[in-house]
Amino acid sequence: MPRRLDVHIIMDNYGTHKTPLIRNWFARRPRFHVHFTPTYASWLSLVERWFALLTTKQIRRGTFHSVPQLKAAIQAFIDAHQENPKPFVWTKTADEILASIARFAERTTDARAAQLLSRTIGTGH
């Protein structure tokens, strides 16, 4: 990578990335910019989301007869994305996400209980 370009690094919010040793290392290297994922958010989710965009907007729409064609399509997507990059924005708090998961768990548990009850009544047990 040419030294004239900035390097952006995405890290999770784990404390080891924020020690004085690490902070000093980055302070001596101004071309490196560190971005932390939100607390309680997995950095992997951001990566997965980006690959989901690549899949839905580029790969699924195409027909590729060779690996070089597929690679060219992926590179075209990356190039287009880099021309007008937009950060992923977290719109829900961890509490909102956990509440949503709890509601889903409650619905699926209720549905399973109703299914079991229906089977029990239907068999006369």
Image: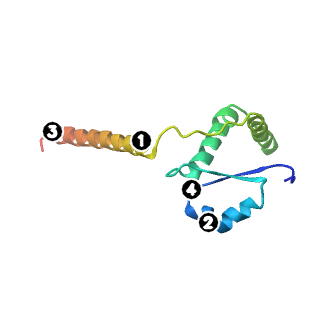
Which numbered mark, 2 or 3, is in the foreground of this view?
Answer: 2
Which numbered mark, 3 or 4, is in the foreground of this view?
Answer: 4
Packing grade of label 2 (10 A; few <14, some 14-19, many >=20) is: few
Q: Give the left or right position of residue 104, taking residue 122 as reference.
A: right
Which numbered mark, 1 or 3, is in the foreground of this view?
Answer: 1
Q: CA distance from mark 2 to mark 4?
A: 12 Å
Residue underneath mark 4: 13
Residue underneath mark 2: 19
Q: Residue at x 29, y 44 (%)?
A: 109
Q: Along the polypeptide, which appears first: circle 3 or circle 4?
A: 4
The reply to whether dot 1 and dot 2 touch (C-beta < 8 Å) is: no
- Residue 54 on image: x %, y %: 67, 39
Under mark 3, the amino acid is Ile
Residue underneath mark 3: 121
Under mark 4, the amino acid is Asn
Which quarter of the rendered picture does the C terminus lie within?
A: top left
Q: Along the polypeptide, which appears first: circle 1 or circle 3?
A: 1
Under mark 1, the amino acid is Glu
The reply to whether dot 1 and dot 4 touch (C-beta < 8 Å) is: no
Q: Which mark is residue 96?
A: 1
- Looking at the image, residue 107 lies above or below residue 30: above
Name the element at disc 3. helix
Q: CA distance from mark 1 to mark 4?
A: 19 Å
